[in-house]
Image (cartoon, rainbow, N blue to C red):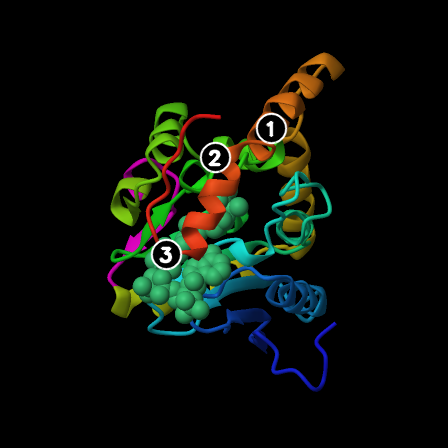
């Protein structure tokens, strides 16, 4: 719930059956529990029939779309940092289950879990000046299975491995050429391109869009996974979040210094 006494970190305005949801948590839209609660509330309020399309954006002119998971809220006591009920996981599932097409309108740089939020939207329109970085290996974080699957749904394996293993920023143009981003446009055209796309969505059947979106979600998640395979991946992830590298990654971030990983 958006608490009355707190300034909501997310705004939602509806016009012409399009819900414009703006992340507004300076300085970097870190995906904190508070921001995600407000984003969840905004998504919950933006429903048919008043709404037929949703846009998630940052404040116009932002240099950072979102810095990803709030590092200050990552556990450092041997607990899995990205479990089913982690706020980031919850809001990504909410975007995937939303009955309307959700468009990510990206300006500024996108980091870590915020890349997955963007990639989990149904369509992505990005400023040509934007960059995207997947940073688990720079923080020592064992990204979770659903998150990795969501990234693999939109990007080829070599691109995913490049982004994960290097933690380097990749340009919107590169992701556009790779089919990860639907449209890469000059910053000045971003608003018009998104408005045109959402107007086309609004003009189609909301019933068919809702059904097709859920059909695509179910089909894209249809992966047979044996209990043994699940347990093996969980054991690997535990090896990471129980490691000194995990502690070092988060401590280095907090101390604003490069991490020194020792692989244990
Ligand atoms: O020092 P103050 O108090 O002013 O705070 C600084 C930063 O510490 C803070 N901040 C964050 N706080 C929590 N969580 C974050 N993710 C985060 N990012 C930044 O914001 C204040 C301004 O940051 P500063 O001075 O660095 O601003 P800048 O404009 O020079 O640089 C902006 C960024 C976003 C390029 C830079 O802050 C940055 O590289 N942030 C970390 C991006 C990142 O690695 N995100 C991944 C988070 S972890 C996550 O999403 C997943 C769990 S995973 O790791 O698996 O991908």
Residue 36 or residue 43, whichever sits in front: 36
Per the model, the C-alpha gap separating discs 2 and 1 is: 12 Å
Q: Which mark is residue 256?
A: 3
Q: Nearer the viewer, mark 2 or mark 1?
A: 2
Residue 264 versus residue 114: which sits nearer the camera? 264
Disc ID at residue 103 = none
Which mark sits nearer the N-terminus, 2 or 1? 1
Task: Give the residues in magenta.
Answer: 176-186
Residue 219 lies in what quarter of the image?
A: top right
Which residue in the protein does label 1 denote?
A: 237
Q: Residue at x 55, y 58 (%)?
A: 72
Percent of width and height locating residue 4 = 72, 85
Q: Residue at x 61, y 83 (%)?
A: 7
Asked whether the viewer can see residue 207, the reply is yes
> For this rendering, which residue is in front, 219 or 235?
235
Please tell me in which quarter of the rendered image ligand 1 is found. bottom left
The yes-or-no answer for disc 3 within 8 Å of ligand 1 is yes
- Across and down, in percent, residue 238 comes to 63, 28
């Amino acid at each position: 719930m958006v608490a009355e006494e707190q300034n909501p970190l997310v705004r939602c305005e509806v016009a012409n059956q399009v819900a414009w949801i703006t992340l507004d948590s300076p300085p970097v839209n870190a995906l904190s529990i508070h921001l995600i609660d407000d984003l969840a509330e905004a998504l919950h309020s933006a429903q048919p029939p008043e709404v037929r399309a949703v846009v998630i954006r940052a404040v116009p002119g932002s240099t950072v779309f979102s810095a990803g998971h709030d590092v200050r809220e990552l556990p450092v006591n041997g607990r899995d940092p990205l479990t089913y009920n982690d706020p980031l996981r919850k809001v990504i599932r909410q975007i995937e289950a939303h009955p309307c097409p959700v468009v990510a309108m990206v300006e500024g740089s996108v980091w870590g879990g915020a890349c997955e939020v963007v990639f989990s939207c149904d369509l992505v329109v990005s400023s040509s000046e934007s960059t995207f970085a997947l940073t688990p290996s720079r923080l020592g974080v064992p990204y979770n299975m659903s998150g990795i699957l969501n990234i693999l749904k939109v990007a080829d394996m070599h691109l995913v491995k490049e982004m994960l293993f290097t933690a380097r920023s990749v340009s919107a143009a590169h992701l556009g050429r790779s089919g990860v981003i639907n449209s890469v446009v000059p910053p000045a055209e971003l608003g018009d391109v998104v408005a045109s796309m959402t107007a086309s969505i609004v003009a189609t059947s909301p019933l068919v869009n809702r059904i097709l979106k859920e059909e695509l979600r179910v089909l894209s998640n249809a992966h047979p996974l044996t209990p043994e395979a699940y347990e093996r991946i969980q054991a690997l992830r535990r090896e990471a979040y129980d490691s000194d590298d995990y502690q070092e990654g988060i401590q280095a971030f907090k101390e604003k210094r490069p991490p020194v990983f020792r692989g244990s």
